[in-house]
Amino acid sequence: MFDTQLTLPDLKTAILQHLTYTLGKDAQNASVYDWRMALSFAIRDRIVGPWFASTRRTWAEDRKRVYYLSMEFLIGRLLEDACVNLGLRDLAVQAMEDFGQDFSSIVENEPDAALGNGGLGRLAACFMESMATIGCPAYGYGIRYEHGLFRQRFEAGHQVETPEDWLLSRHPWEFERPESAYTIGFKGTVENRDGREVWVPGETVQAEAYDTPVVGWQGKWANTLRLWGARPTTLFDLERFNRGDYTAAAEPETLARTLSRVLYPDDTTYQGKELRLKQEFFLTSAALQDILRRYLKNHNDIRALPKHVAIQMNDTHPAIAGPELIRLLTDGHGVEFVEALEIAQACLGYTNHTLLPEALERWATFTFGNVLPRHMQIVERIDAWHKDEYHSRPHYVGIVKHHEVRMGELAFIMAHKVNGVSALHSELIKKNLFPELDKLHPGRIINETNGVTPRRWLRMCNRPLSNLITDTIGDGWEDDLDRLRDLEPHVEQKGFRDAFGAAKRVNKARLSDWLRTECGVSVNPDAMFDVQVKRIHEYKRQLLNILETIAHWHAIKQNPKGRWVPRVKIFGGKSAPGYAVAKEIIHLINDVASVVNSDIETRDLLTIVYPPNYNVSMAERLIPAADLSEQISTAGKEASGTGNMKFMMNGAPTIGTLDGANVEILQEVGRENFFLFGLTAEEVLKRREDGDHSKKAIEASKPLQDVLQMIAEGRFCPTQKDRYHGLVHRVWHHDYFLVADDFDAYRAAQAEVDRAFADRDRWLRMAAMNTARSGFFSSDRTIRGYMKDVWSVEAAL
Ligand code: 26W
């Protein structure tokens, strides 16, 4: 039920009360920040009711709870999302207007909570919202990083990172819980006391809880996102302080706080850093202690835990949950080892998000045993037990191999279900990642195709289109997204198609204004907006996109009078700070942009923009304004993708390969509404067997030769002509991601895009069909899948 009781005067009074008494500010000289705080507190107050009610019901009905463990929650801004879900947005706009304030400016004053890198963290945020919408009793557990993902700037085309500081301003959505704190140990020794193993940690810190309520659609249910902050066990060393050694006195404080200081900015490349392992254990141990404490409040049979508790590991980052739960059950509750292992297995699920070998976590046994000595023993025991239970296990399979602890194998063995995130990905997990374990445990690997929340990614970020949808098929589609299919018959009507085009045009005009003021680039809002936004990675092939852009520019210049379709090429995304090749690609895109954008001959036909610091809020601006969605990864490499689903929902057809969830998008939307190109995952493997594949591909493609020639000659970097020699050499000789092999097919698909876009009626049909057939990609559908197949949990709504 929407909060229908709240009237405009009520809301205004609440806002003024908070401005006055919570913030101590006089309306006369309140800043945008003050108004944002006052409004946020007033809105938060409306969440507390449903939040308490949900918690009370869960207790009263003794419901099973889901615990989602994730090192990342990329939640973005919360104010507008809360307003939308509570049905208070219009009222909030009006209230702020009455106070002489602009709602959009207030919303934009909120910093993004960027506690994640990319897809995995954003998926966790969508899942939290969907669990609240469905009424699945759940807690998200994560780390309250003081500094989220770095801010990105460009200096002379280079990426420069600066620290992110979202907590410098007050975070109005959380409740601090100093009373909910747990001690987390590290290092030390394991002592055998009367035949029992006892861990005596050498270091301890406190994990302190901060709770953010997450409210679902229409405020019917709310769950908790509980983030842990690290605090010293002892505040400071008084003796040293009294001696006047102030820096040394503050040492325990500094050491502890380091744990929740920053998010690791690597996505898809893994580095075996001790601090990262400590962060993983910090999150996991705090969460498990909290879970057991809550369970034991109203249960006394620890063996019945799996009936009441489902724990999901978001990738292997919290995979220490297996050994830690065994430790708590054996060392803490006297359960015998094998029984503890079976209880843990029955509680745990593991989601795999990547097949890239460089992303699979493995810890040197030296590091692991040093940081977590008791867990090292338990891991070895799990491995021995598994080998014993499954005699046919090949010698090269196992958790501890070559002096490393393999977190993927650990998570697999300790979970009762292992899932991939798209149909193709789940098959590849069986075939390539865990073929032997799959044989030993048939049926354990399942698929749960990703989804995204349509509340944030359609209703909130695209009001013109959402209003059109509601006007056309009525309301109720937001939490029943398959209803978008009801749009299909309307797509046949010209009036609807024009309205669909008009909604897109509004978003494009808005984005054009923003690009002018924020990036100083003016673009033609009637041009095709062709968008690739995601982390920069070789496998995602931003390089393929920019090479094709150069070829396109070259073609225009050779035939300036041709009937070209004007395009705006939009790039967005960050590179990991240590990923040199990705940084070089960013540099190239910026270099090409500055040459192309200053070419008067092609100015009206091609513009390249790369707004810095892509984040959730920028996605909410770009995606609704996109005409074309670029999903061009090397087949077999993108586990799922979720940006692809957001573009589809917002009426942007995909140009893409048969990779990740693109396969299912194609299946849902139909071949005629998707620009398919490129090698398949199987063909990719075959092609690589030929050591000369890229050389052959380049020799067969005049346009690609020309492009590489231009880059090599320094056309895009006249001041340093050899800047991209290394890059060009790699395309010729070490093209692992098959940029050259897919180039011609990509170029042909882009030509088809041009033809389709030039036929406005054809284009609008395609665009509208993408929205109409996107229902499957609601994260509500995904969550229902997990509830049934993995968690065995019932919805309370
Ligand atoms: C330890 C370093 C590290 C950190 C993060 C390695 C790997 C990761 C993540 C698994 C990377 C990630 O975000 N994967 C993405 O997950 C999305 C949600 O399932 C998928 O849609 C993307 O395809 C996948 O790349």
Image (tube, rainbow, N blue to C red):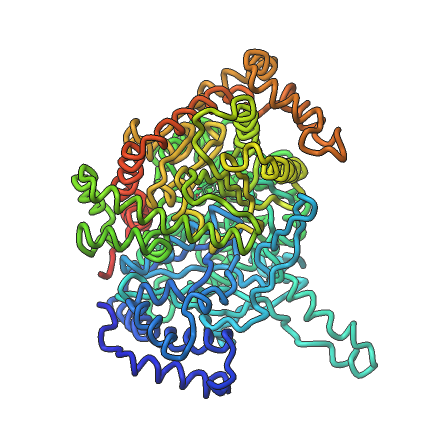
Q: Quadrant of the C terminus?
A: bottom left
Q: Position of residue 231 (x, y in %)?
A: 61, 70
Q: In the image shown, does 572 or 98 lie closer to the viewer? A: 98
Identity of the residue drawn at 36% across and 82% down: 14
Asked if residue 338 is positioned above or below residue 42 in the image, the reply reads above
562 relative position to 780: left or right: right
Q: Quadrant of residue 97?
A: bottom left
Asked if residue 108 is positioned above or below residue 272 in the image, the reply reads below
Q: Position of residue 553 (x, y in %)?
A: 55, 28
Identity of the residue drawn at 57% across and 42% down: 361
Asked if residue 446 is positioned above or below residue 309 in the image, the reply reads above
Q: In the image shown, does 699 or 522 lie closer to the viewer? A: 522
Identity of the residue drawn at 23% across and 77% down: 5
Q: Position of residue 678 (x, y in %)?
A: 44, 23
Q: In the image shown, does 353 or 777 lie closer to the viewer? A: 777
13 relative position to 247: left or right: left
Identity of the residue drawn at 42% across and 53% down: 510
Asked if residue 740 is positioned above or below residue 272 in the image, the reply reads above
Is residue 642 shown to the viewer in this render? Answer: no
621 relative position to 607: left or right: left
Q: Position of residue 30 (x, y in %)?
A: 50, 81
Q: In the image shown, does 386 or 369 lie closer to the viewer? A: 369
Q: What is the number of callouts on the image?
A: 0
218 relative position to 593: left or right: left
Q: Quadrant of the N terminus?
A: bottom left
